[in-house]
Amino acid sequence: MSIANTQEYNAVLAVLEKYLEGSNGNVELLRQAFHDNAIINGRPIQALYDTVARKGQTNSTSRLDYLDIVGNVASARTMIENWHGYNFVEYQHLVKDKTGWKITSKTYTEIKLD
């Protein structure tokens, strides 16, 4: 088992930051974070791109709650608040290949905040 060094941690973090920033209406940046064959809640990732393009820019805020990296795989939990009035807890799984880190799957659920 190989736990990630700071350089790998920062590389994964950069992909997650692209994802979170892209979710605020920048589909091209969003695409950079995902693997071509990625899925979202079991569906092709195109569903996310279409939704973000349709909804457009938003003033949501986000944070990384958890990140675990071992070898060439990583798992993260993020939270997005006020994405067009909705709040989400999300889980991303990433893989590193010859092109670098990419999100291969995303699952999410809507939550209510007090």
Image: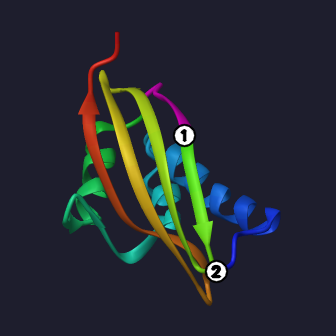
User: Is residue 59 located in the magenta-colored stretch of the structure?
Assistant: yes
Look at 47% across and 56% down and name the residue there. Answer: 30
Image side of residue 24 versus residue 49, left or right: right
Q: How is the image coloured?
A: rainbow
Residue 8's spot in the image, x, y percent? Answer: 73, 69
**What's the amino acid at mark 1?**
Asp
In the orientation shown, which residue stands out farthest toward the bottom? 98
For marks 2 and 1 on the same chain, the one whose residue lies earlier in the sequence: 2
The residue that mark 2 highlights is 1
Look at 52% across and 71% down and name the residue there. Answer: 102
- Residue 105's place in the image compared with 71, above or below, is above
The residue that mark 1 highlights is 65
Look at 18% across and 65% down and name the residue there. Answer: 43
Residue 59's spot in the image, x, y percent? Answer: 47, 25
Say which of 58 and 37 sits in front.
37
Query: Which element type, helix, strand or loop, lies under badge 2?
Result: loop
Query: Which element type, helix, strand or loop, lies under badge 1?
Result: strand
Distance in Å between CA atoms under marks 2 and 1: 23 Å
Split into 4 quadrants, where in the image is the C terminus? Answer: top left
**What's the amino acid at mark 2?**
Met
Q: Residues within 10 Å of mark 1 (few under 14, many from 20)?
A: few
In the orientation shown, which residue stands out farthest toward the left? 43
Split into 4 quadrants, where in the image is the N terminus? Answer: bottom right
In the orientation shown, which residue stands out farthest toward the right? 6
Identify the magenta region: 58-63
Residue 97's spot in the image, x, y percent? Answer: 57, 86
Q: Residues within 10 Å of mark 2 (few under 14, many from 20)?
A: few
Residue 81's spot in the image, x, y percent? Answer: 42, 26
Look at 42% across and 58% down and name the residue there. Answer: 92
User: Is residue 113 located in the magenta-colored stretch of the structure?
Assistant: no
- Residue 96's place in the image compared with 12, above or below, is below
